[in-house]
Image (cartoon, rainbow, N blue to C red):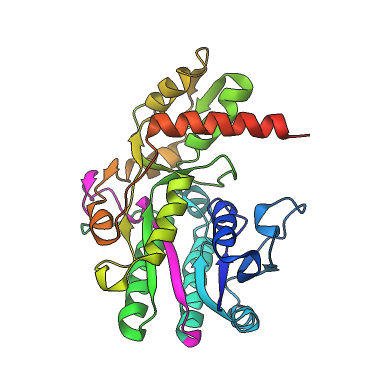
Amino acid sequence: MKRILVTGALGQIGAELVPALRARHGGDRVVATDIRMPARDTAPATHDGPFERLDCTRLQHIHEIVRRYDVGTIYHLAALLSATAEERPQSAWDINMGGLYRILEVARQHRCALFFPSSIGAFGPTTPRDMTPQDTIQRPTTMYGVTKAAGEMLCDYYAHRFGVDARGLRLPGLISYAAPPGGGTTDYAVHIFHQALRYRHYTCFLKPDTALDMMYMPDAVRAILALMDADPARLVHRNAFNVTGMSFTPERLAAEIRRHIPDFVIDYAVDPLRQSIADSWPRAMDDSAARAEWGWAPRFDIAAMTADMLDKLRERSRAAP
Ligand code: SER
């Protein structure tokens, strides 16, 4: 049986996708990799299966790991998020684009299937922002978006030209209790929960009325697994399916949290960089292609997500030593 390789396994998606893949396929069949070594042996990706340090810009090392573990499918999650990419655009190009190109080359030569996460960041200010169509104008104005839009096209190219079974989603902001995000524009929707529980107060870096697509991580993991399970004959789009779970603004999320923590207070100190990124992204995507082609349907809306986030974070703080 071929193994599964996950890059960026210690990141926001990897921290939850690796345990889900291991629960499904067995620990030994999922090779978790990251450019960082885990600080302590507490990261989920380091439990119950192999972990390797891997820099995705090093082609020979990717070949070596894919050969050594007899890898058949790669989940390529290693990338810089939007705000970090805007601060370090040259590194973002090298890591996001250079990493994907090398992974695709390895996938071509070893005949691996590939999952690639694109993003709402692949759209830009000239994209329709409400009910953003599956196929529409994409002129992203961030380096993150440039690498995601180009990545979608590069995956399509490898699928059509070389027959690589590459598939992908345009994920919205992801909300998770398990792993913190790092350097994203949608990170406020995670930080707000930690601060609400600890201080009853959060200072948001986006304006109160900034609407963005979001998704609870259990839905994102289900979406990734369902897309990779889908019958390829039904896939028309393959590499860049719009998927969304909900759309909300910071003030709407604060109101939802207040239903559980009545004295919670939000105020605002707008970060111009992240506000300008958010203003260039969709408010609410149309995900009907994903629904039609592989049966996508989210389970968590803002109310269900908020209740579950608060429950899970409270459980974790009770369990913490
Ligand atoms: N959550 C991501 C970011 O903010 C969007 O893909 O960068």
Image coordinates of residue 277 in percent, x first then y, are: 39, 44
Image coordinates of residue 292 in percent, x first then y, are: 23, 57
Which is more toward the observer, 13 or 186?
13
Quadrant where the C terminus is found in the figure: top right
Which is more toward the observer, 243 or 127?
243
* 135 left or right, relative to 254: left
Query: To which quarter of the image does residue 273 belong?
Result: top left
Is residue 118 found inside the magenta-colored segment of the image?
yes
Inspect this view and state whether residue 203 appears: yes
Q: Which residues are magenta?
A: 109-133
Q: Establish if 117 lies above or below 65.
A: above
Residue at (62%, 20%) from the top-left corner? 199
Residue at (51%, 81%) from the top-left corner? 106
Residue at (38%, 68%) from the top-left corner? 167
Which is more toward the observer, 130 or 69?
69
Image coordinates of residue 175 in percent, x first then y, are: 48, 41
Residue at (61%, 76%) from the top-left corner? 58
Q: How many marks?
A: 0
Image coordinates of residue 283 in percent, x first then y, are: 29, 40
Which is more toward the observer, 201 or 267?
201
Is residue 45 found inside the magenta-colored segment of the image?
no
Inspect this view and state whether residue 138 appears: no
Q: Establish if 26 lies above or below 287.
A: below
Quadrant where the N terminus is found in the figure: bottom right
Q: Establish if 200 lies above or below 220.
A: above
